[in-house]
Image (tube, helix red, strand yellow):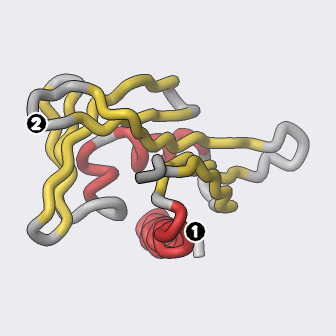
Amino acid sequence: MEGKVRYELEFPIMSSPQLLYQYISTPSGLQEWFADNVNSRGEFFTFVWNDSEEKARLASKKTGEKVKFRWVDEENKDAEYYFELRILEDEITKDVSLMVVDFAEEDDLDEAKQLWENQISDLKHVIGSV
Protein backbone atom coordinates (compact mmCIF):
# COMPACT_ATOMS: atom_id res chain seq x y z
CA MET A 1 0.00 0.00 0.00
CA GLU A 2 1.49 3.28 -1.08
CA GLY A 3 1.40 6.28 1.24
CA LYS A 4 -0.53 9.40 0.51
CA VAL A 5 0.89 12.18 -1.64
CA ARG A 6 1.20 15.78 -0.48
CA TYR A 7 -0.44 18.45 -2.57
CA GLU A 8 -0.99 22.20 -2.39
CA LEU A 9 -3.84 24.32 -3.69
CA GLU A 10 -4.04 28.10 -3.72
CA PHE A 11 -7.32 29.99 -3.73
CA PRO A 12 -7.61 33.77 -4.14
CA ILE A 13 -9.98 35.16 -1.51
CA MET A 14 -11.26 38.71 -1.27
CA SER A 15 -10.97 39.16 2.48
CA SER A 16 -8.72 40.68 5.07
CA PRO A 17 -6.22 38.19 6.53
CA GLN A 18 -7.64 38.91 10.00
CA LEU A 19 -11.19 37.96 9.03
CA LEU A 20 -10.05 34.92 7.08
CA TYR A 21 -7.98 33.73 10.06
CA GLN A 22 -11.12 33.61 12.23
CA TYR A 23 -12.69 31.21 9.74
CA ILE A 24 -9.72 28.84 9.60
CA SER A 25 -8.67 28.80 13.26
CA THR A 26 -11.82 28.69 15.41
CA PRO A 27 -14.37 25.88 15.80
CA SER A 28 -17.25 28.26 15.02
CA GLY A 29 -15.46 29.60 11.93
CA LEU A 30 -14.55 26.13 10.64
CA GLN A 31 -18.08 24.90 11.26
CA GLU A 32 -19.44 27.50 8.83
CA TRP A 33 -17.63 26.02 5.82
CA PHE A 34 -15.34 23.09 6.60
CA ALA A 35 -17.41 20.56 8.55
CA ASP A 36 -20.99 20.08 9.71
CA ASN A 37 -19.89 20.37 13.32
CA VAL A 38 -16.58 21.31 14.95
CA ASN A 39 -15.79 20.96 18.63
CA SER A 40 -12.56 21.66 20.45
CA ARG A 41 -11.16 20.56 23.77
CA GLY A 42 -7.83 22.20 24.38
CA GLU A 43 -5.64 21.51 21.39
CA PHE A 44 -7.91 18.74 20.03
CA PHE A 45 -10.55 19.46 17.40
CA THR A 46 -13.31 17.04 16.41
CA PHE A 47 -14.65 17.45 12.88
CA VAL A 48 -18.03 15.90 12.04
CA TRP A 49 -19.35 15.30 8.51
CA ASN A 50 -22.70 13.49 8.25
CA ASP A 51 -22.05 10.31 10.26
CA SER A 52 -18.28 10.48 10.09
CA GLU A 53 -16.09 11.94 12.82
CA GLU A 54 -12.38 12.75 12.62
CA LYS A 55 -10.13 14.09 15.32
CA ALA A 56 -7.10 16.34 14.85
CA ARG A 57 -4.65 18.18 17.06
CA LEU A 58 -3.88 21.84 16.45
CA ALA A 59 -0.21 21.17 15.74
CA SER A 60 0.80 24.77 15.15
CA LYS A 61 -0.62 28.18 14.49
CA LYS A 62 0.65 31.62 13.75
CA THR A 63 -1.98 34.24 14.44
CA GLY A 64 -3.25 35.86 11.26
CA GLU A 65 -1.14 33.58 9.07
CA LYS A 66 -1.64 29.82 9.35
CA VAL A 67 -3.03 26.82 11.18
CA LYS A 68 -1.87 23.23 10.95
CA PHE A 69 -4.02 20.32 12.11
CA ARG A 70 -2.45 16.87 12.53
CA TRP A 71 -4.87 13.95 12.39
CA VAL A 72 -4.83 11.73 15.48
CA ASP A 73 -5.96 8.16 16.19
CA GLU A 74 -8.34 6.91 18.88
CA GLU A 75 -5.65 7.29 21.58
CA ASN A 76 -4.93 10.88 20.46
CA LYS A 77 -1.57 9.80 19.05
CA ASP A 78 -0.39 11.82 16.07
CA ALA A 79 -1.00 10.24 12.70
CA GLU A 80 1.38 10.70 9.78
CA TYR A 81 -0.86 13.13 7.93
CA TYR A 82 -2.01 16.69 8.49
CA PHE A 83 -3.62 19.58 6.70
CA GLU A 84 -2.48 23.16 6.80
CA LEU A 85 -4.31 26.38 5.91
CA ARG A 86 -1.97 29.29 5.21
CA ILE A 87 -2.98 32.86 4.45
CA LEU A 88 -0.83 34.57 1.83
CA GLU A 89 -0.90 38.31 1.23
CA ASP A 90 0.88 39.92 -1.69
CA GLU A 91 2.98 42.76 -0.30
CA ILE A 92 2.42 45.03 -3.28
CA THR A 93 -1.16 44.34 -4.40
CA LYS A 94 -2.42 43.24 -0.96
CA ASP A 95 -4.24 40.38 -2.72
CA VAL A 96 -5.08 37.62 -0.26
CA SER A 97 -5.14 33.92 -1.00
CA LEU A 98 -5.51 30.76 1.03
CA MET A 99 -2.95 28.00 0.56
CA VAL A 100 -4.20 24.50 1.41
CA VAL A 101 -1.67 21.74 2.09
CA ASP A 102 -3.15 18.25 2.38
CA PHE A 103 -2.52 14.59 1.60
CA ALA A 104 -4.50 12.09 -0.47
CA GLU A 105 -4.11 8.65 -2.00
CA GLU A 106 -2.82 8.98 -5.55
CA ASP A 107 -6.06 7.49 -6.92
CA ASP A 108 -8.18 9.96 -4.92
CA LEU A 109 -6.17 13.09 -5.71
CA ASP A 110 -8.64 14.65 -8.15
CA GLU A 111 -11.55 13.93 -5.82
CA ALA A 112 -9.68 15.40 -2.84
CA LYS A 113 -8.86 18.58 -4.78
CA GLN A 114 -12.48 18.87 -5.90
CA LEU A 115 -13.62 18.54 -2.29
CA TRP A 116 -11.34 21.42 -1.25
CA GLU A 117 -12.60 23.53 -4.17
CA ASN A 118 -16.17 22.97 -2.98
CA GLN A 119 -15.31 23.76 0.63
CA ILE A 120 -13.38 26.91 -0.29
CA SER A 121 -16.33 27.95 -2.44
CA ASP A 122 -18.51 27.63 0.70
CA LEU A 123 -15.95 29.67 2.64
CA LYS A 124 -16.06 32.44 0.02
CA HIS A 125 -19.85 32.56 0.25
CA VAL A 126 -19.75 32.75 4.05
CA ILE A 127 -17.33 35.69 4.07
CA GLY A 128 -18.86 37.41 1.05
CA SER A 129 -15.89 36.90 -1.26
CA VAL A 130 -17.75 35.88 -4.42
Q: Residue at x 65, y 61 (%)?
A: 11
Q: Residue at x 26, y 57 (%)?
A: 31
**86 displayed left or right of 82:** right
- The label shown at residue 74 is 2
Vertical position of residue 123 compared to residue 76: above or below: below
For mark 1, give the secondary structure. loop
Total label count? 2
Q: Which residue is mark 1?
A: 129
Residue reaching furthest right?
92
For disc 2, the neighbor class at 10 Å (few under 14, some 14 to 19, many from 20) is few
In the image shown, does 11 or 50 lie closer to the viewer?
50
Of discs 2 and 1, which sits in the foreground?
2
Q: Residue at x 63, y 52 (%)?
A: 8
Instruction: Locate residue 84, reporting x and y percent.
Output: 49, 40
- The label shown at residue 67 is none
Instruction: Locate residue 126, reporting x and y percent.
Output: 41, 67
Vertical position of residue 83 compared to residue 126: above or below: above
Instruction: Locate residue 109, reporting x and y percent.
Output: 53, 66
Q: Determine whether label 2 and label 1 are within 8 Å by CB.
A: no
**103 displayed left or right of 9:** left
Name the amino acid type tagged 2. Answer: Glu
